[in-house]
């Protein structure tokens, strides 16, 4: 499928590297305006440079594991591009360790990014998407959600 995304604005979480950056690149290549979210502004600047820069790309530095971070990423996207059509909840963390060595803080961090952050992201985009007559939310998840792997929470 080679869908044209011209005129669509997409917010991709966890977009500074890996799968998030690949998703941002693909959608940008198909004409989308893309807001790239991650925690580190320097990482986002490098990602945007890797994509060639331009006025259809913007960094959204925010912690999507918080209400304020999700709301800031959405508000920043709408302020910059005037709309939000697609949310790709991709952000994740990976800190493998045996359960006997996994700290409560590590567990909470995983939960906050991968579960709470996904929920907060979906909740945060509703009004922006309604303003455009609707939109799409895509939640990326790991195969670890269906099958256990050693040393993974």
Image: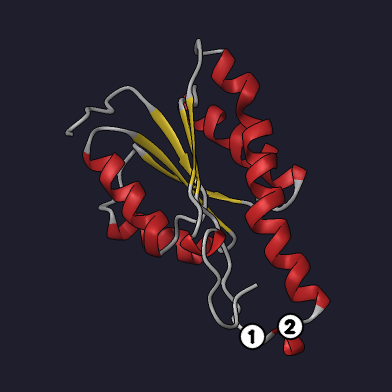
Residue receiving disc 2: 102
Q: Secondary structure at mark 1?
A: loop
Q: Secondary structure at mark 2?
A: loop
* In the rendered image, the vertical position of residue 122 relative to residue 45, given as above or below: above
Where residue 90 appears, as percent x and y from the top left, is 50, 51
Where residue 143 appears, as percent x and y from the top left, is 47, 61
- Residue located 65% across and 72% down the image: 153
User: How far is disc 1 from disc 2 in space, using C-alphas?
Assistant: 6 Å
Where residue 19 appears, as percent x and y from the top left, is 38, 59
Q: Is residue 128 left or right of residue 101?
A: left
Q: Are marks 1 and 2 in contact (CB under 8 Å)?
A: yes
The mark nearer the N terminus, 1 or 2, is: 1
Number of residues whose C-alpha sits closer than 10 Å to that of mark 1, classed few (under 14), some (14–19) or many (20 or more): some
Residue extending furthest toward the left: 2
Quarter where residue 39 is shown: bottom right
- Residue located 60% across and 76% down the image: 152
Where residue 103 appears, as percent x and y from the top left, is 79, 81
Q: Nearer the viewer, residue 132 or 19?
A: 19
- Residue located 57% across and 13% down the image: 131
Number of residues whose C-alpha sits closer than 10 Å to that of mark 2, classed few (under 14), some (14–19) or many (20 or more): some
* In the rendered image, the vertical position of residue 132 relative to residue 106, given as above or below: above
Quadrant housing the N terminus: top left
Residue extending furthest toward the top: 133
Residue receiving disc 1: 97
* In the rendered image, the vertical position of residue 8 relative to residue 108, given as above or below: above
């Amino acid at each position: 499928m080679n869908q044209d995304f011209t005129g669509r604005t997409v917010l991709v979480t966890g977009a500074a590297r890996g799968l998030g950056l690949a998703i941002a690149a693909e959608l940008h290549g198909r004409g989308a305006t893309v807001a790239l979210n991650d925690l580190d502004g320097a990482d986002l600047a490098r990602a945007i440079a890797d994509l060639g820069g331009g006025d259809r790309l913007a960094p959204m530095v925010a912690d999507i594991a918080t209400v304020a971070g999700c709301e800031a990423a959405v508000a920043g996207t709408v302020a910059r591009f005037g709309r939000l059509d697609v949310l790709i909840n991709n952000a994740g963390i990976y800190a493998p360790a045996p359960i006997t060595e996994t700290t409560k803080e590590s567990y909470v961090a995983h939960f906050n990014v991968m579960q709470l952050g996904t929920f907060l992201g979906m909740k945060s985009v509703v009004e922006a998407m309604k303003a455009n007559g609707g939109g799409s939310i895509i939640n990326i998840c790991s195969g670890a959600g269906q099958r256990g792997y050693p040393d993974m929470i």
